């Protein structure tokens, strides 16, 4: 079955996008990336440290991997816009994962600043993938601003709490049937990824759930399979929930 | 003269251009970007962009992230 994800004219075979943070070694990260089947990875923009030799982190990524820089660590639209412009200049890519954080404890997004930054960046030709709180109205505004996808959280970044907002994600899916919805942040285990996909997410973006697993490579495989399973289940259409039993074997004809 | 680079105040010997600045800081020039007083300077303009006293410079690269 061909079931690709198209995002801003780019076709992905994998519906799993993964991060590059928190791995214990480059070898572990590379093995996990390969096992995940992901075709796009996120990276963060950071000051080059002064007075110390640095190698390019990007040299440790598989050359075929599409790189999605993020604006992590930005607390207002202005900083996120500047960070996006720097990322574009350094990487020669218009793609940006827009992340504007509202507070350092929860790392929850500042939706208002995110929207403001998205409007500016879209006008500047960026392909803006915004991370935001799971609010349908904000999703509509971000899409109206020209974002080719929206990326609602399932739970706080790095929390591994799993999908805390299934109703909101389902409402978003039903009300925005044509939008690309990528669940970003909150997945802890493969069942979380499967649940998000079963709810109709088009893809999942995750980092910590793989990077902090004892065996990151094996967890990456598990996540790949979970995303595929959840997607197939969503496309298949689940059975209705019933309060009472419904026999699978014929009642009639059973011996008396 | 004195400039601010990545949040640190630095004494630099003269009005370096941005290519010379990277060399002075022993930074490789690939896969990074430079912002001067909050505006990105295109790579092609590094050679003709000279620093002035009190300039604020950000030099960024990429690290692991989610």
Image (tube, grey):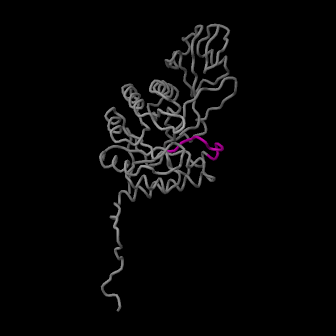
The N terminus of chain A lies in quadrant? bottom left
Corner quadrant of residue A255:
bottom left
Magenta stretch contains residue B37 = no
Residue B41 location (% of width, % of height): 51, 18
Residue A27 location (% of width, % of height): 64, 45
Nearest to the observer: residue A191 or residue A84 = A191
Nearest to the observer: residue A250 or residue B58 = A250
Corner quadrant of residue A246:
bottom left
Nearest to the observer: residue A171 or residue A144 = A171
Residue shown at 57%/29% (left/top)? Answer: A46
* Farthest residue, direction right: A52
The C terminus of chain A lies in quadrant? bottom left
* Magenta span of residues: A17-28
Vertical order, A244 against B44 (above or below): below
Nearest to the observer: residue A72 or residue A57 = A72
Residue shown at 61%/15% (left/top)? Answer: B4
Corner quadrant of residue A60:
top right
* Farthest residue, direction bottom: A256
Residue shown at 70%/23% (left/top)? Answer: A51
Q: How many marks?
A: 0
Residue A97 location (% of width, % of height): 46, 35
Magenta stretch contains residue A21 = yes
Residue shown at 68%/9% (left/top)? Answer: B13
Residue B18 location (% of width, % of height): 58, 15
Horizontal relation, residue A104 to residue A148: left or right: right
Vertical order, A92 against A196 (above or below): above
Vertical order, A129 against A28 (above or below): above
């Amino acid at each position: 079955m061909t079931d690709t994800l198209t995002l801003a004219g780019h076709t992905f075979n994998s519906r799993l996008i993964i991060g590059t943070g928190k791995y214990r070694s480059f070898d572990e990260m590379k093995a996990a990336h390969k096992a995940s089947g992901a075709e796009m990875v996120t990276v963060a923009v950071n000051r080059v440290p002064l007075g110390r030799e640095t190698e390019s982190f990007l040299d440790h990524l598989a050359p075929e991997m599409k790189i999605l820089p993020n604006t992590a660590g930005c607390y207002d639209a202005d900083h996120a816009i500047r960070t996006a412009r720097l990322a574009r200049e350094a990487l020669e890519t218009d793609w940006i994962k827009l992340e504007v954080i509202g507070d350092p404890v929860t790392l929850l997004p500042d939706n208002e600043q995110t929207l403001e930054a998205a409007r500016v960046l879209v006008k500047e030709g960026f392909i803006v993938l915004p991370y935001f709180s799971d609010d349908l109205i904000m999703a509509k505004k971000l899409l109206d601003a020209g974002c080719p996808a929206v990326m609602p959280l399932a739970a706080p970044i790095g929390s591994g709490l799993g999908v805390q907002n299934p109703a909101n994600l389902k409402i978003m899916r039903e009300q925005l049937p044509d939008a690309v919805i990528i669940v970003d942040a909150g997945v802890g285990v493969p069942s979380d990824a499967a649940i998000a996909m079963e709810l109709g997410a088009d893809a999942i973006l995750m980092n910590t759930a793989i990077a902090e697993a004892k065996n990151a490579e094996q967890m990456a495989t598990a996540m790949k399979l979970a995303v595929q399973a959840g997607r197939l289940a969503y496309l298949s259409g689940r059975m209705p929930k019933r309060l009472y039993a419904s026999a699978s074997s014929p009642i009639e004809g059973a011996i008396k | 003269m004195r400039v601010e680079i990545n949040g640190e105040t630095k004494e630099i010997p003269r009005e370096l251009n941005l290519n010379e600045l990277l060399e002075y800081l022993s930074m490789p020039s690939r896969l990074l970007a430079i912002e001067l007083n909050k505006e990105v300077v295109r790579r092609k303009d590094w050679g003709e962009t000279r620093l002035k006293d009190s300039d604020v410079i950000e030099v960024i690269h990429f690290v692991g992230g989610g």
